[in-house]
Amino acid sequence: TALTAPAMAEEPKFGGTLRIASLQPDLDAFDPLTGYSVDSWEILRAVTRQLVTYPGATTDIKDDTNLVPDLAKSWDVTPDGKTYTFHLKDDVFFSGPTDRKIVAADFVYGIKRFCDPNKQVAAINYFNLAISGFVDYCKEFAKVPTGDLAATKAFIDSHEISGVSAPDAATLVIKSDTKNYDFLNILSMNFVSPVPSEIASRYFPDSAEFRKNFPSSGPYYVESYQDGQKLVLKKAKNFKPESDQARKAYVDEIQVDFTANGEDSVVQKIEAGEADLSLYLEVPPRSAIRRFQNDRDSQIYASNSGSANFITFNARPEAQSEGANALRKPEVRQALTYAVNRAHLVQSQGGPVAAVPLSQIITSTILGHEPFDPYPTDGNKGDPEKAKALLAKAGYPNGLKLDAAYRTTAQFETIAVTVKEDAAAAGIELNLIAVPATQWYAFIQDPSSRWDISLGSQFSPDWQGPSTRMLLGGWLNSDASPCGTGNVHSICYSNPELNKLAAEAFPSDNPGPIWAKADKLVSTDLPWIPLFEKRKIALTSDRITHWAWSSLAVQADITNIAVKN
Amino acid sequence: MTKRLLSIVLRATSTLLIVLVLSFFITRIAYRNPAAMLAPRNATQQTIDAVARALRLDEPWYLQLWYYLFRGPDIQGAPMGLAHWPPALGYSFRKQAPVTDLILAKAPVTLSLALGAVVIWMSIAIVSGVVAARWQGKFIDHALAFFAYVGLSIPTFLSGILISFFLFFQLSTIGIHWFPSSGYVPLVEDPFEWARHLALPWLTLAIAEIGIFQRVVRASMLDVLGQDYIRTARAKGVSENRVYFDHALKAALNPILTLGGLELAVIMGGAIVTETVFGLDGVGRMAIAAALDGDFPVVIGTTIFAAAAFVLCTLTVDLLAEWRDPVAAG
Amino acid sequence: MSDRIHVVTAAEVFPAPPSMLSLVLGNLWREKAVRIGGALVVLVILAALLAPAVAWLLGHGPTDQFRDTAMDEMGLPIGPSLAFPLGADGNGRDVFVRTLYGARISLLVGIPATTVAMIIGTAIGLVSGFFAGRVDRIISQAIDVALSFPFVVTALSLLSLNRGGTGEPIIPPVLVVILIIALFSWTYFARLTRGLVLAMRTSPMVEAARTIGASRRRIILLEILPNILPVVFVYWAVQLPANIIAEATLSFLGVGIQAPMPSWGNMIAEAQRTSLYQDQPWFLAGPGLALFLAVAAFNTLSAGLRNVLDPHHRT
Amino acid sequence: MTVFSVNDLRIRFGDIQAVRGVSFGVEAGKTLAIVGESGSGKSASVLGATGLLPQSATVEGSVLHRGREILGASRKALRAIRGAEIGFVFQDPLSNLHPLKTIGQQIGEAITAHRRVGGRQREEQVLALLDDVGIGNPTSRLKDYPRHLSGGMRQRVMIAMAMALTPALIIADEPTTALDVTVQAAILDLLKKLQERHGTALIFISHDLAVVSDIADDVVVMRDGYVVEKAPATDIYLRPQQSYTRELLGAARLGRPQRAASISAEPHRPELLSVSNLGRSFGTTRPVLDNVSFSIGKGEILGLVGESGSGKSTIGRLIAGLDRPDAGMISFQGKIYAQPGPTGLRIAPDLRAAIQVVFQDPYASLNPRRRIEAILADPFIIYGESDKAVLRERVRHLVNDMELPADILQRYPSELSGGQRQRIAIARAIALKPSLIVADEPVSALDITTQAKILALLGRLRDRLGVSFLFISHDLGVVSELCDRVIVLEKGHIVESGPTGRVFDRPEHAYTRQLIASIPGQRRAPSLSGIREAAHV
Ligand SMILES: Nc1ncnc2c1ncn2[C@@H]1O[C@H](COP(=O)(O)OP(=O)(O)OP(=O)(O)O)[C@@H](O)[C@H]1O
Ligand SMILES: Nc1ncnc2c1ncn2[C@@H]1O[C@H](COP(=O)(O)OP(=O)(O)OP(=O)(O)O)[C@@H](O)[C@H]1O
Ligand SMILES: [Mg+2]
Ligand SMILES: [Mg+2]
C-alpha cells in the first residue's frame, strides 16, 4: 500500500496552487511568537525561516529529525557547549510589507518580543532555560503597561538580553547558562524567527493587522487574509531557492480555505477535488480512512506521529475529592489502567492504521523509546477483574466514582464514552463532564474546577527525536514545571529520582539510555495513564505529485509538496 | 402620526438598550474567567492576571460597561482617555478588533443569505400558497400540503446535511461541480459566483420556510377569499387570475409580511445552523464561535446585532402594515 | 338578522362549547390531519414508552457499547442486522435502541418546556391584556426584549451560567435545556393570550360580568380563561414540534443533551461529524427519520386541531 | 320586456337546501323587491343565479338573461355579463370594497374589466360616475381608500361601480341595511333617480317591507327558500294574501310612528339618575360627548336616539360605570359616582347592582362556555348567596319570569335562539333588582317579530318592577313605541328632548325633523294605515 509514501520517480514540477481545507474557521495563531500548535506551525513553515530546520521527509515523520542550516549558513559552538555563534546567509530577504534583507538584529528583535506583556511567547519555559539573562529581561518587561505600543517599542529599544547579541549584520550570538544537547532543536521551533522591528512594532502581536501585514521571512508571503474565509500565500519574488536547503517551495500559491465546517465537510472537499489537504483535522473520520484505503490508495499517507492520548489526574493539592484522593494511591491508578481497554480505543480511532496501543510515557518517534508495558493485558483489552481486585485492595471493594472531564470534540467524546463503558465493567463509574473545547485549558487550569480525571489530555512532541525534554524533562519534571497554574493538564507530578535523571540527561552527549531508564521508572509509577499513540493520517486529493512529511507540523510539509498544474 | 412614530422608535431603542444591558450581565456572569480562557494554555497566574487587568475585569461593573461601549481593553491599545464614538460594542479578545468592525465585516454574508432566502421562499410560497388556495381540496392542494409539511418538519440542520451531501458531494463525485460546498464570494466581486455559493444555503433555509409560509399564504388567502370584496370583484367581472393574484393576494399579504418580518429577523440575526453547515462566514457563525470561546464582547455584540435586526424588521413590517392599512394595523 | 352586525365576540374565539364535546370529537375525527397526526403521535409516544422494553428484548442498553460484535477492526459500525435492527453507531451502540430513547428525550424536553412556556406565557398575557395600559406597555416591552435575543447564542450563555464555582452544573443540564426552550417560547403564548384577552376585555361578555359586580379574579377565571384555554391548548400543540426541533438543534450544536445520553440531535451530529453515515446510513437515517416523523406527527396533528378548533388561524 | 328571469331555482349547500324552487322576473325600468326574514334564501337566489356563490353550492333550474340561459354558462361567459350587463350593490359597503385599493382604482376596474380604455379616459369616466352618484369634489376622492369615506359615501361608490357600464340590470342586496335612516333615504333616492335616468331594471333585496315600500313595483316574499307570495307592490301592501306576509307587514313600522295610546306621559316622576355636563373624548379628535345633561325618573323609559357614532353607547357605558367621564358628573339618587379624575369612578356594590346593562348582541354578552344556570346564578353568588338550593330556586324563578322553559337552564347559549338569549341577558340584569337598566340597542340584532316580543317584555318589566330604562336605539319606530321621553343626540350634543309624542309630532330641531322624515315607508304609509291597524288586531 501507499501508507508509507512511495518515492517519487521523477523530479516534481514547480508551479500550481495547493488548496488546504481548514477544519477551524481561523488559524489559532499566526505569528511566530504565538504559534504553538502543529497546525499553526504547518502554515508558519511557509512564511518563516529559522536558524536551523528540518528538510522534510518523504517516508515517515520520524525520518525528519536531521537538522540542516536554514538562515544560518554555519555556526560555531564553544567547547563548554554554552555559546553558539551563527553566521547568517547573505541572500535572504523578507517579503510582504517589506523586502529588505534579513539581518542578525531581526533575530534579536524576534527574541526580545518573547515576553511582550501584551502577548507572551507560547513556550516561554524553553527560553527561560536556554537563553542567559532572559528571565531578568522579562521581569523588567512585565512592568511595561499593556496596550501601549510606543511603550513596548521603547522598552525593546532600550533593553538588551544578555544572552543574545548581533555583533554585525551577519552574526548572531546566543549564550546559554547550561549545556543542552537539544539546544539547536529548541532554536528550530518557529518561535526563533527573524522579525523586522519596523513592521512588527506597529502592531500588537498576532493581531488581525499583524496577520494581514505579516512580515514573511519564508518562501511565501501573505497575499490576502480574511479570517473565516481564506488565507492566500504567494511565492515571494525575492525568495532565492538556492538559499534554502529545506524548502523546495514547489507550488506558486497556497490557499487555506476556512469555510469547511466539520470533519465530514473537510473530507468531502478533498474527495470532491475542492481541496488537496486538510488542516486541523487531527483524525480523519474512520469511514473516510476506509474509503481512501479502498478506492484512493495513493491519496492516503500515514506515519507514526509521536503524539499520544492519555488520562491525567487532578493531582494539585487543592483537589481533595474522594476520587482525587483515591487516585493518589498507586493501586487505584493501576486499577484504572487495567480497566481501560486500549484495543477498544484504538478501534475507536479507526483501527491499527490510525493508532497503536500505548503503555509508556515516551512515544515511538522520540529519543529513548524502548517498547515497554508495565501492566500488560491480553490483546491490550484490559483486565476488569484485576482492576476490581486492585480497587478492593486499595479499599474500594464497591467500586469508585470519578468525575471525568473531556473536551467536546468528536475525538475526545469518543474516548470519553468508550472509557466510561469499559471502566464501568471494572466497577469504576465515570461521571462525564463536557467542557467546550475552547474553554478546556481554562477549565483544567482553574484550581477551583471540579474534576478527578481528564479524558481530554493529549501530547504532541514539539519536535521529533530528541524531544524527551518535553515530557520527562518538562511536564513530569517538578523542577521544570512546578505544580500550579501553568502546569499543563495539572499533572503536578513530583519524582526526585526522575528529576535527577533529567538533570543528568540534559548536558549528556548520549541521553538516550538515560531517558529510557527514566521512562521505565515513570511509566510504572503511572503519573498518567497512556492510552494510545496516534498515527498521523493525511488524506489528499489526486493532484499531489510529490509528498513530504514535516516533523514539526506532524503532517504534510507544504513547502515540499508538489501538485499537478 | 409623528407621535406614534416617535413612540415606536422610542420603544425600539429602549428594547435595544435593555438587551444590551441584560446581555452584558448575562455574559459577564456566564463567562466567569475570560482571562484564563484567553491566556496561552500554559500561562502562569501572573500572565492571567495581566490579561485580566488588560481586559479591565477587576473594575466595577458600571465602568466595565462604559469601557465596553466606548473604549477598548488596554490590550488593544485604544488611545488612553479617548472615548470611542460611535460605541464600539467592545473589542474582541480573540480577534483584537472592535466588535462593530467585525460584525460589519461579516454582515454582508448574513444579509446576502437572509435576503436571498427571503426572496426565494416568499416567491415560491406565495405562488404555491395561492395555487393551493385556488384549488382548495383538489389534488394539487393536497400535494402542496404534503410538501409543506415535509419541509417544515425537517430541521434545518438535517436538511442542510442532506442537501450538502447530495447536491454537493454526490454531484461532485460524479463530476458535476455545480455547487461549491461552502464559502462566500461578495456580490460586487462576481454576482454569478455569489449566487452559486449561496444556492445551497438558500435552498436549505427556503425549504423550511416555504413549508411554513405556503400554509400561511393559503390560510390567509382562504380567509380573504371569503370576504365580501372578493365577491364584489367577481361581480364586476374581474378575471379570476386578477381576483386571486391582485385582489385577494393584496389583502392576504399582511399576516404574511408580519410573519415574514419575524422569520427574516431571526435569520438576519444569524442563521447559525445554516451558516455552520455551509461554512458561511456570517454573523451567526462568528456568534457561536465567540460563545464557545468565551469572547464575550463578541457575544454581546452579535446579540445586539440580532436584536437590532429583529427590531428593524418588525419596525419595517409594522410601518409597512401601517402604510398599507392603518385601520387594520392600528 | 344576527349575521348583520359583525363584532368579534368571545364566541368566535372558540365556537364549540363543551356540551358539544362529542360533536367536537366527531369533527376532529372527520379531519384527516387529526387522524393521521394522531396515529403518528401515538406511535412516537409508544416508541418512547417501549424503549426500555425493546432495549431489554434486544439486550442492548442505550449506552452499552458492543465494540467487538457491532464494529469491525477499524471501528466501523455494522449495518442493520437481526441483533441490531438499525445497525450500530460509531461507538458500537444500538442505533435502534438509542433512537427509541431519543424519543423519550424529545418528549421529556419538549413537553415540559412547552407546558412551562404555556403556563408562564398565558399568565403574563392574561395580565397584560386584562390590565392593559401601563402594565401592558411594560410587558409588551419585556416581550420585545425576549424576542430580540437570538436563541442559540443566548442559550449557550445561559448554559454557561449554569456552572458553579467548581465548573460543575448547578442544576441538571436537561433541566436547563427545558428552561431555556421555555424561556424562548413563552412570548408566543403571551402574545397570543394578550391579543385574545385584549379583544375580550371590552367585549359585552366581560362588561356584563362587570356590571353585575364580578371581581377581577372571577372575570379572569370564569369568563376569560375558559374561553381562551382551548385556543391556548391548540397552540400548545402547535408550539410543541417547534420546541422538539429546538432541543434537537441545541443538541446538534453540542450544547443541549450531552453524550452519552442519546438525543436525536446529538445522534445526528455524531453521525455527521464522524462521517460514518456514509458507511452506515441508518446511523443518520434512524434518528433523522425519527425526528422528522415526530415533528411531522405533531405538526400534522396540531394543524388538524387548528383547522377544526381555531378556524381563524393566528400566526 | 323581461330583462332577467329566474325559473324554479333550487340551491343546495351540502345537505342544506337553501332555495327550493324560486321563480321571478324583472322588466326593464322596473323594480322587483325580494323580501323575507334572514336566511330565507334571498341572497342565495340572486347570487346563485349569477354564479357568485362559492363552489360548494349546487344550483339548479333556469336563469334567463335577455332571453339567454346563463345557468351553467362558462365562467368566461358569466364574467362577460357580470359588471357589464348586471351590476351589483351589496349590503355592507365597507366589507364589499377592497380595503387596500383606492376608490379610483376600484371604480376604474369595473370599466377596464370589460373595456379597453386609456388611463386618461378611464379617469374621466370615473370622475363622471362619482359626480353622478353625488360625491362632491370627485377629483380629490380618487386617491382615497374606502376607510377615508363615510358609510353613505361608500355605498355611493358601490353604486358608481355598479353603474359604471350602465348595465341593464342592477341587483341590490340590502344596500341600505347597514346605514343610518337619513343616509338610507338618500341612497334610496339615488338608486331611484339613476334607475329612472337609465331605464335600468332593479332587483332590490330587503328584509324590511317598509324599506321597499317606496321603491318596489313588484314584491316577492320569501320564507325558508320558498316564494310565499309574489304580486305587484300595491297588492302586497293593501291586499296581502298570505298570513306570513301580513305578519311581516304588521311588524314593519311603516311611516311615521304611531303613538300607542296606552303610554301616557306621567306628569312628574322622582329623579333617579342625573347626568350633568357630561363630556368624554377619545384621543385627539373632537369630543364624542360634549356637555350632555339629562335625568331619568323613577320608572321612566327614556329613549336615546341619534345616528351611528353620535355617542349613544358611550353615554350608556358611562352611566353603567364601565367608563369614566372627562368632564361633568353622574349621580344616582343624589350620590355622585362618576366624575373625571383617576379616582373618579367609585361604585359601591349596591350601586353596582342598581344599574344594569342589556347589550345589543345577546350572544356576545353571554359566556359561550357556561350553562345558562351558571350564568344566571352569577349575580346571586357575587352578592353573597352560596346555598345551592336557594340559588337553584332563584334562577328557576328568574327564568320563569322571562317566560322561558325551565329546561333551558342546562343548555349553553349557543343552543338558544336569539330571542331566548336576549331574555337570558335581561334576566341576568334584573336578577339584582336594579333600579335602572341601560338597554343599548337591545333589539336591533333580532328579527322583526322577535323584536316586538322583547319590547313588550321590557314594557311589562317596567310596569311590574318599576325599573327605569335608558333605552338606546337608532330606530325611531322602536323608540316611539316604548319610551316615555326621548332625547336626540347629534355628534355628542343633545339637540332635542321631550315627551315622545311631542318630539315626534312637533319636532323642534332640524336634525330631529330630518330623522323623522327619513323613516322609510312614508309614501305608502297613509294608504297602509288601515292594514296596519287590521294586522294588529
Ligand atoms: N356559503 C354558504 N354555505 C352554506 N350555507 C349557506 C351559504 N350561504 C348561505 N347559506 C345558507 O343558505 C340559506 C339562505 O341564505 P341567504 O344568504 O340567501 O339568506 P338571506 O335571505 O339573504 O338572509 P339575510 O337577510 O340574513 O341576508 C341560509 O340558511 C344560509 O345559512
Ligand atoms: N374606546 C373608544 N376609543 C376610541 N373611540 C371610541 C371609543 N368608544 C367610542 N369611540 C368613538 O366614539 C364615537 C361614539 O361612539 P358610540 O359607540 O357612543 O356611538 P353610538 O352612538 O353608540 O353609535 P352606534 O349607533 O353605531 O352604536 C364613535 O366615533 C367611536 O368611534
Ligand atoms: Mg342576504
Ligand atoms: Mg352603539
Image: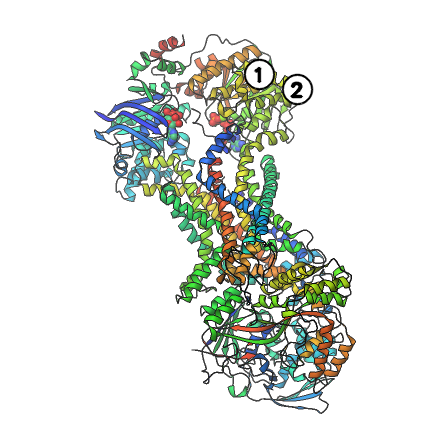
Q: Quadrant of ligand 1?
A: top left
Closest to the observer, B311 or D446: D446
Q: Is residue A59 above or below residue B66?
A: below
Q: Position of residue D199 (x, y in %)?
A: 24, 26
Q: Identify which amino acid the numbered label 2 is placed on.
A: Asp
Q: What residue is drawn where x is 61% and y is 84%?
A: A51
Q: Is residue D432 something one can see in this rendering?
A: no
Q: What numbered label is drawn on residue D396?
A: 1
Position of the C terminus of chain D by quadrant: top left
The answer to whether the residue bearing label 1 lies less than 8 angstroms from the nearest atom of ligand 4 is no
| Same subunit: marks 1 and 2 | yes
Tally the marks. Answer: 2
The residue at which mark 2 appears reads as D387
Mark 2 residue element: loop
Closest to the observer, C38 or D520: C38
Q: Is residue C129 above or below residue C173?
A: above
Chain containing mark 1: D
Q: Position of residue D95 (x, y in %)?
A: 41, 33
Chain containing mark 2: D
